[in-house]
Amino acid sequence: MTALRSVCPFDCPDACGLLVQVEDGRAVKVRGDPEHPYSQGTLCPKMNGYERSVGSPDRLLHPLVRTGAKGEGRFRRASWEEAIQLVAARWKDLAREHGSEAILPYSYAGTMGVVQRNAGHAFFHRLGASRLDRTICSPAKGAGWSQVMGATAGPDPDEVLDSDLVVLWGIHAVATNLHFVQRVKEARRRGARVLLVEVWPSETAAVADRTILVRPGSDGALALGLVHVLAREGLADEAFLAAEAVGWPELRARALAEYPPEAVSRLTGLAPAEIEELARALARARAPFLRVGSGLSRYANGAMTVRCIVSLAAVLGAFGRKGGGCFADASSSQALDLSPVTREDLLPRPTRVVNMNQLGAALAELRDPPIRSMMVYAANPAAVAPDQNAVLAGLAREDLFLVVHERFMTDTARFADVVLPATYSLEHADLYRSYGQYCLQRAQPVVPPPGEAKANWEVFRLLAAAMGFEEPVFRMTEDALIDAVLERLSPSWRAGLDLERLAAGRAVTLRPPAGPRWRTRSGKIELRNDALAEPLPRHLPTHEERGLPLRLVTAPAIHTLNSTFMERPELRERNGGMSLRLSPAEASARGLADGAAVVAWNGLGEATFALRVTPGLPDGIAVAEGVWWLAHAPGARNVNALTAQRLTDAAGGSTFYDNRVDVRGA
Ligand SMILES: Nc1nc2c(c(=O)[nH]1)N[C@H]1C(S)=C(S)[C@@H](COP(=O)(O)OP(=O)(O)OC[C@H]3O[C@@H](n4cnc5c(=O)[nH]c(N)nc54)[C@H](O)[C@@H]3O)O[C@H]1N2
Ligand SMILES: Nc1nc2c(c(=O)[nH]1)N[C@H]1C(S)=C(S)[C@@H](COP(=O)(O)OP(=O)(O)OC[C@H]3O[C@@H](n4cnc5c(=O)[nH]c(N)nc54)[C@H](O)[C@@H]3O)O[C@H]1N2
Ligand code: SF4
Ligand SMILES: [Mo]
């Protein structure tokens, strides 16, 4: 029996190191790797049992070709040769008749490995297909950060160990960033206070000394209200601001004029005294550390909200102090040049770009040419994309040729014309970086794939051959691509990196390069940014200021990750089934009892949930945790039947949290 090293491939900031016990070519037990610099031997409840996902009896093992009606899920087995030839022939016809832009790739973060995740890019660029703007997660958060900080790298998350006041701001860290929580707990043992800013008391409240509940989408106003109090009471870090920032006098004037506690109280629902007290606590702290989640960026004002919070961190001088700062994302993407994989140079001309948050509209409305074929890999849009009714209507189109590369018969795969079986991370090679810490790790396959499952890169090599694409890239192996990416590690990031350790499959830690401290146009933190239509931060309205009575909060579930892990019955059970939380007052106002089947509805659609009456939940919100497969939903839809295709104020991001509903008995 041997234990082999690997990496957790999922869309999670932790990117934990794994030790896989292999017996007779099967992964029998997956544990945390105690030698991993960041995760240090522990895993989350989802990955404790990864071998059950990998060894699931429900895995797709062979290519399938549709025999039933669209979406019915009836298929016959086919050979890889037949399936690939069928797809290539269809795409050649479509390209000839309608132009290649009639074909749309759709992929996201089923795996975070840089080769498999981006495996279709070179192929679809070469084909001249429509391009996908991959905006479903949190591009608005990135935009808000860079509007103030430019390309400045995020701090090392371990800074938090030296903080004396940690603010978990719009992050359900117990579900989504467990190894950061371990550090927060350590900071607390060393005497730090921990605050959580949320819209409901999630389980993350258990690691905080205090939870501050705000109205959905109002955090930008809160941040500016705090700036007001800091300015009014002389608590801003004037020395830091004078030396390191531009625009403080203007931001100060705006905050003083427009964001007094009384006005901010009306927007956030916090009492003026609470806002004042919070500002003073932040100012008293030696090293405040703000950890900004993504939830608050998924609103019409998402980028601006993050910009306001990052600006607050600067006003506190947090960036200048050991243990202080503001962490939104790790910046390790700056270290890697993925062009050997993504190959934008193969694009014959700048083709049309489709925002993935508007997939439903794209499938219904695009012309010249309409989308006539889509290939989905490492994503499950039928479950995770907003406006599910529009997405499902698009997938059901008779004239849409749908190819899905998957490990399971997902809600998306059911609609496919051709289904191709995919590998799990333990069965293919890749290189992993993280968006929550700075480890880089290379993984080799540790077990063979079951049945005829193939990795993304292999599938696109086969498709390229069948299409007659002759560029050498389509003959490269995954390992050669990883080598090409590593060869391009920028010299400043490469310095001091133990490349032998990396080659041996162990994690190494990237160190952001020394250089200018603030990588902005002005060379300073930009509280005022003249390149923007709004040179100064202000609070923007959300999409859903008015309308139906309940704001819908679609929070992450602890035991699953988006729609991933839903294949495991024990994890679905630990999530408590597909449920909707209401406060006791909201439930009784509607005559609804705990456990009842309820329908949440709005102008986009409706979805059935089991009601969880939750004491302590604020009135005026409904909380749905997790993105459920339709197969496990109590009704015909999941929460995304209630979310809109509208975008954020910058970067075309999703607005999953910016919706309203009402609830009735089923
Ligand atoms: N267990 C688990 N882990 C996951 C995921 C999962 O689904 N499950 N998803 C993964 C992915 S893809 C991502 S992007 C990350 C996301 O990780 P996070 O950033 O933690 O998660 P979000 O889903 O963005 O939402 C976090 C919290 O924001 C709160 N929130 C919503 N609106 C507001 C608001 O206006 N103000 C404030 N202050 N809070 C608000 C929500 O109630 C929610 O609890 O997690 C990853 N990890
Ligand atoms: N209502 C609501 N909707 C949300 C969210 C929310 O908070 N609320 N969160 C949003 C966010 S933050 C995100 S990032 C998106 C996530 O959207 P997706 O990235 O689409 O996420 P998953 O649901 O995890 O689906 C990934 C699929 O990829 C498959 N897969 C995994 N690895 C591989 C591989 O190597 N090859 C292939 N071919 N397939 C593979 C898995 O089996 C799985 O079915 O969802 C979004 N949707
Ligand atoms: S999902 Fe996140 S916390 Fe869990 S093992 Fe993977 S990287 Fe670690
Ligand atoms: Mo995400």
Image (cartoon, grey):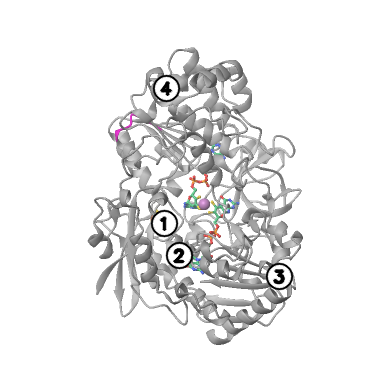
> In x, y percent, where is residue 345?
52, 63
Q: Earlier in the sequence, mark 3 or mark 4?
A: 4
Magenta span of residues: 162-166
Query: Disc 1 to disc 2, how far (Cα)?
Result: 9 Å
496, 358: nearer the viewer: 496
| Mark 1 nearby-residue class (10 Å; few <14, some 14–19, many ≥20) | some
User: Mark 3: which amino acid?
Assistant: Arg
Instruction: Judge whether 519 appears above or below 508 on screen.
Output: above
Question: Which label's residue is closer to the chain start, 2 or 4?
Answer: 4
Q: Nearer the viewer, mark 2 or mark 3?
A: 2
In the image, residue 27 sits, relative to residue 390, either above or below, namely: below
Q: Which residue is mark 2?
A: 341
Residue corresponding to mark 1: 337
Residue highlighted by disc 3: 372
Q: Determine contact: label 1, label 3, CB under 8 Å.
A: no
Which of the two discs, 2 and 3, labels the residue nearer the N terminus? 2
